[in-house]
Image (tube, rainbow, N blue to C red):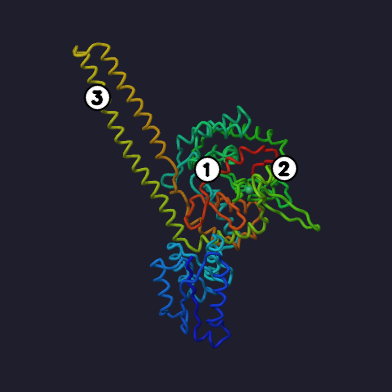
Amino acid sequence: MRCGLYIRVSTDMQKEKGESLDVQLKRLKAYVDSKEDWSIAEIYKDAGVSAKNINRPEFNKMIEDIDQDRIDVILCTKLDRLFRNTRDFLNTSDNFEKKNITFVCLEGNIDTSSPAGRVFSTIRAAFAQFERETTADRVRDVMRSRAEEGKWNGGISPYGYYSENKELKINTKEEKVIRELYALYLEHRSIRHIVHHFNAGGIKTRKGDLWSSTSIRRMLTNPFYYGIVTYSKRSHTYSGELRRNKKPIFSNGKHPPIISKELFDNVQETIKQQSREAPKANAKYLLTGIVYCGACGSKMHGMAHRRLKKVHRYYRCSGYVQKGSAKCKGNAIRVDNLEGSIIGDLRKFSLNPNRLEDALKDLTELNSDNSDAIRERINSMKNRLIQIQTKKQKIFELYEEGNINKADFLSRKNLAEEEDILVNKEMGALKERVSGTDFSSYDLEYTLGLCKNIKEVYDDLDLPDRKELIRSLLSEINVDKHDIEYSMPVQPKFISFTQNSGLFVKSSDTGRGSSRKPA
Ligand SMILES: [Zn+2]
């Protein structure tokens, strides 16, 4: 890795007790030395200019070197050496990211060779720029009032639906899966059975992945499917007791139901019976079900440790707990550490709304591009069907006029009919694909608003509200020894995310399941 060291001392700073160029240089050199294959390629020295001054010759040379691919890493001692303000930082670091430049700033331990480093640097630089605007109450009110209006809380349209002009319509292919799901559960009383049945039968999730127990359970217990929008129906206190939320919201959704209330109630009753024996666990761990071990892909389950009368709570890799060190070395993270960094990171989203919006646009375009191509193919198939129809008519005429014998007529007719069936089948499959994932219902402003205020409001929210909030923003969290990765429902590009959710399906289905407790 070729490193460029940027050092700067303004005339003002020299008067003060600022770090001299030599001191900065020494510290940066030491950092480079500490890295195995890093070496110094260039030193940029802007002496005696202030950061506010646009005219920084060495800074410009640095940018030039980056553009010419002469540098892999940029190092500085303090952010304000390199950047004049937050905007400058965001623009320049954008450029770094595009050019795949690693950025290191000694103060604050920023090192963007790790995703965590990227996150912290952005938060840090933009922190001052955003003042609190909303209180916890207001955020909660927004979430609640949406539910009261019969709107679902953010995210892309629920499985079984697609949105058209901000309205939810039934996706017939997914609707069929949901109906089957409920019927299968009543028949076999086993979520695991459904998971196996679907995965073995080639029924995929909307993203084309395998099903997991969690996703199946979530669909089985979601009253949305009989037409109800809920908000904070039940909750757990920190001591783990289940309590009913004082102000739960059930409202009639604006969407068409897929199943009857009777069927839903039946399934809930069965689930209750089935889980009666299962141990109560994870009640006070609000991220259970969406946290995964970055090392082995297993879910991470909550656990408490009592030491010196103090209780320490962790999320711990269930692969390790259930299968031992052959599976995983035992990844664990403190509950408060994980929650803390999530809040910080989510806030980051709001600092860069354009990029979230761009990512969203890309996804939508990508999606509609595909749809256009598929629609074109569907059209050409329709034409083909008309041709086949004409052909069949002709064959019949030939036979009628005595130009071909009966055997000839039948074999020609069969051929045409076979093709008819094949084309119809393929067309059906294509039609289903067109009605796939849809991002147009993703409420960008709502999401950004939540993220922006999350740090301030989080502490004031109680557990069910926190749970609701995080789940409406994140669909998956991967915890590694060094990094935490997130998936949002729309997977914005600037957050690293795990695409291979096949991993967690595997781990949840091959496990014995003895202590498994779904969220
Ligand atoms: Zn693990």
* Residue 419 pos. (x, y %): 32, 25
Secondary structure under tag 2 reads loop
Q: Quadrant of the C terminus?
A: top right
The answer to the question of whether label 3 and label 2 lie on touching residues, with beta carbons closer than 8 A, is: no
Residue bearing the label numbered 1: 253
First in sequence: mark 2 vs mark 1 = 1
Residue type for callout 3: Thr
Front residue of 202/459: it is 202
In the image, 301: left or right of 497?
Answer: right
* Residue 215 pos. (x, y %): 57, 41
Q: Is residue 132 visible?
A: no
In the image, 453: left or right of 207?
Answer: right
Find out if the beta carbon at label 2 lies less than 8 Å from the nearest ligand 1 atom. Answer: no
Residue bearing the label numbered 2: 280
Residue type for callout 1: Gly
Badge 3 crowding class, 10 Å Cα cut-off, few under 14, some 14 to 19, many 20 or more, is few
**Residue 390's mark?**
3
Secondary structure under tag 1 reads loop
Vertical arrangement, residue 248 with respect to residue 34, above or below: above
Vertical arrangement, residue 205 with respect to residue 42, above or below: above
Q: Quadrant of residue 508?
A: top right
* Residue 225 pos. (x, y %): 54, 38
First in sequence: mark 1 vs mark 3 = 1
Check the image and name the residue furthest to the bottom.
15
| Residue in the picture at 76% in, 55% down | 311
The answer to the question of whether label 1 and label 3 lie on touching residues, with beta carbons closer than 8 A, is: no
